[in-house]
């Protein structure tokens, strides 16, 4: 049985349109995903090329904008493996210096397995604070406070990471240090009809600490930031690539 089919079978047993049926079921999928290798999904050649890569993440790999002056990061490729109402499976292939901007996964659980290369990850979770007593205060300051969860480099082989709807770094961004690829499982998948659409964010200029932060002793004030929603960045481009691995056929 192809390894991807094994992953698919575990997802089918463990996930519903509302997400994982239990933490134990999620852990079962994670354990299988830990064993995934580039050769299981048709990316062995790309992984070997990444090992031999001698370039620089700050090198001249960016694309010119339409006016000839604005710089665009290299385009990312998405390889679609499977999608249904309970989960989606896909692979993001990132050239060196490419960036996936800060975005969220509302009411979703995400498992990610770095297949090859080195990736810088920065992730946040929203702070669970009381709503302002004055509603106009929230309208005047659309930014929301969040806490830093992860700010590090990951190099394959690296264990599967899991982020949850309200913890684990649900809002994150990536920068490829070298050519890299990661295998993603989302449960449930994005769905605008069900209120699960992808939103993009940036750090706000606000530097004050939110009211009520003293009620969260586990939060380091130095790791608190304000995030504000933005339109998808113009220079963020994801192209549909050709998945060369085993096809997942429904039973």
Image: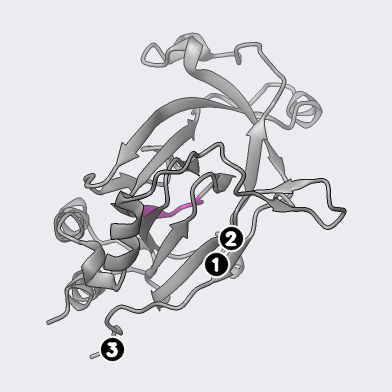
Q: Main secondary structure of the magenta part?
A: loop
Residue annotated with mark 1: 191
Lower position in the chain sequence, tag 1 or tag 3: 1
In the image, which is nearer the foreground, mark 1 or mark 3? 3
Q: Position of residue 182 (x, y in %)?
A: 36, 56
Label 2 sits on a secondary structure element that is loop
Nearest to viewer (mark 1 / mark 2): 1
Residue drawn at (30%, 59%), measured in percent from left and top?
Answer: 47
Q: Is residue 242 above or below residue 35?
A: below
Mark 1 in CB contact with mark 2 (< 8 angstroms): yes
Query: CA–CA distance between discs 1 and 3?
Result: 21 Å
In x, y percent, where is residue 11? 25, 69
Residue 176 is tagged as: none
Q: Which residues are magenta?
A: 105-110
CA gap, disc 3 to disc 2? Answer: 27 Å
Q: Is residue 206 left or right of residue 197?
A: right
Quick check: 63 left or right of 82? right
Q: Nearer the viewer, residue 142 or 185?
A: 185
Is residue 68 within the magenta segment?
no
| Residue 195, numbered circle | 2
Residue 114 visible here: no
Give the foreground label among 3 and 2: 3
Image vertical order of residue 201 relative to residue 222, above or below = below
The C terminus lies in which quarter of the figure? bottom left
Q: Is residue 109 magenta?
A: yes
Q: Quadrant of the N terminus?
A: bottom left
């Amino acid at each position: 049985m192809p390894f991807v089919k094994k992953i698919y079978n575990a997802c089918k047993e463990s996930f519903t349109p509302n997400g994982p049926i239990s933490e134990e079921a999620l852990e079962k999928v994670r354990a299988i995903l830990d064993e995934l290798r580039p050769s299981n999904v048709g990316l062995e050649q790309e992984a070997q090329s990444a090992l031999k890569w001698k370039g620089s993440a700050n090198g001249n790999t960016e694309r010119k904008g339409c006016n000839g002056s604005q710089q665009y990061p290299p385009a990312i490729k998405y390889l679609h493996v499977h999608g249904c109402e309970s989960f989606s499976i896909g692979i993001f292939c990132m050239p060196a210096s490419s960036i996936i901007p800060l975005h969220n996964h509302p009411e979703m659980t995400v498992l990610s397995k770095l297949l090859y290369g080195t990736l810088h990850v920065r992730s946040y979770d929203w702070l669970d604070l009381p709503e302002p007593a004055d509603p106009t205060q929230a309208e005047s300051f659309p930014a929301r406070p969040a806490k830093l969860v992860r700010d590090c480099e990951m190099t394959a082989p690296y264990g599967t990471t899991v982020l949850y709807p309200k913890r684990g770094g649900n809002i994150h961004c990536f920068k490829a240090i070298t050519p890299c690829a990661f295998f993603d499982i989302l449960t449930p998948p994005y769905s605008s009809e069900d209120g699960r659409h992808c939103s993009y964010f940036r750090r706000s200029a606000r530097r004050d600490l939110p009211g009520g932060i003293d009620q969260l002793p586990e939060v380091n004030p130095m790791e608190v930031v304000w995030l504000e929603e933005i339109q998808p960045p113009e220079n963020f481009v994801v192209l549909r690539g050709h998945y060369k691995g085993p096809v997942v056929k429904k039973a």
